[in-house]
Image: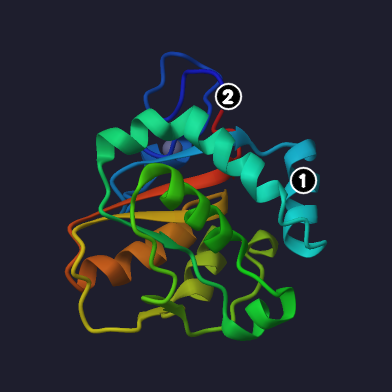
Amino acid sequence: MGEPLCKKCGKPLSTAEAEYCPDCGRKKHLYVRGRAALEYDSVMRESIGRFKYKNRREYGDFYVQELLRACGEAVRSWNPDLLIPIPLHKSRRRKRGFNQAELIARGLGKELGIPVSADSLLRTKKTSPQKELNDQERKSNLKNAFQLAKDNVKFKKILLIDDIYTTGSTIDAAASVLLDHGAEKVYFLCISIGRGY
Ligand SMILES: [Zn+2]
């Protein structure tokens, strides 16, 4: 994914003049910054679909390497003290057998020497797939979707890990809970991200 990228969410931009994608220009996100490794196109849609729904867990290693290659420098400059994968609701996790974001977070944590917590953030509401919803519906869909397992977050700089970034509403919803409970800065990394235009 070549430059230029949105300075907030890391979406690839078609014009070099813009600093932010239209989405980040319009609304304020709760996270500080984020990046993704690969542009979300038809190839990535298939790849991530197989990874998540056809149990192709070995794709995780490739995604981790791509993330390190594309975003390793950014992550080192953010210097997070904890990685947290975006959780699945437990019924969905049971059905799928694994959380794809957790697999990526564990791989990254090992490579970067940063601890991973997959049980501090909980998904307490079974939400509809975000891709079927518009921006407003995404937000209400995610309202109160996340909770903390413990009252306080003892880590200050948290890097959230997810598979696909679209409008940022999932990352913002998770960041909101963390910031309400003691986190100071939240960043994100996603495997794949849409184009910002
Ligand atoms: Zn953006």
In the rendered view, would you say 143 is above or below 39?
Answer: below
Q: Which label was assigned to residue 1?
A: 2
- Say whether residue 107 is left or right of residue 183: right
Task: Give amino acid for label 2.
Answer: Met
In the rendered view, would you say 126 is above or below 16?
Answer: below
Q: Which label was assigned to residue 47?
A: 1
> Mark 2 Cα within 10 Å, few/some/many (few <14, many 20+)?
few
The foreground one among 138 and 54 is 54
Residue 7 visible in the picture: no
> Mark 1 Cα within 10 Å, few/some/many (few <14, many 20+)?
some
The foreground one among 180 and 160 is 160
Give ligand 1's quarter of the image: top left
Query: Residue 72: x percent and y percent?
Result: 41, 33
Ligand 1 contact, mark 1 (Cβ < 8 Å): no
- Furthest residue to the top? 16
Q: Is disc 1 placed on a helix, strand or loop? A: helix
- Say whether residue 191 is left or right of residue 7: right
Ligand 1 contact, mark 2 (Cβ < 8 Å): no
Q: Residue at x 66, y 79 (%)?
A: 92
Residue 128 picture quarter: bottom right
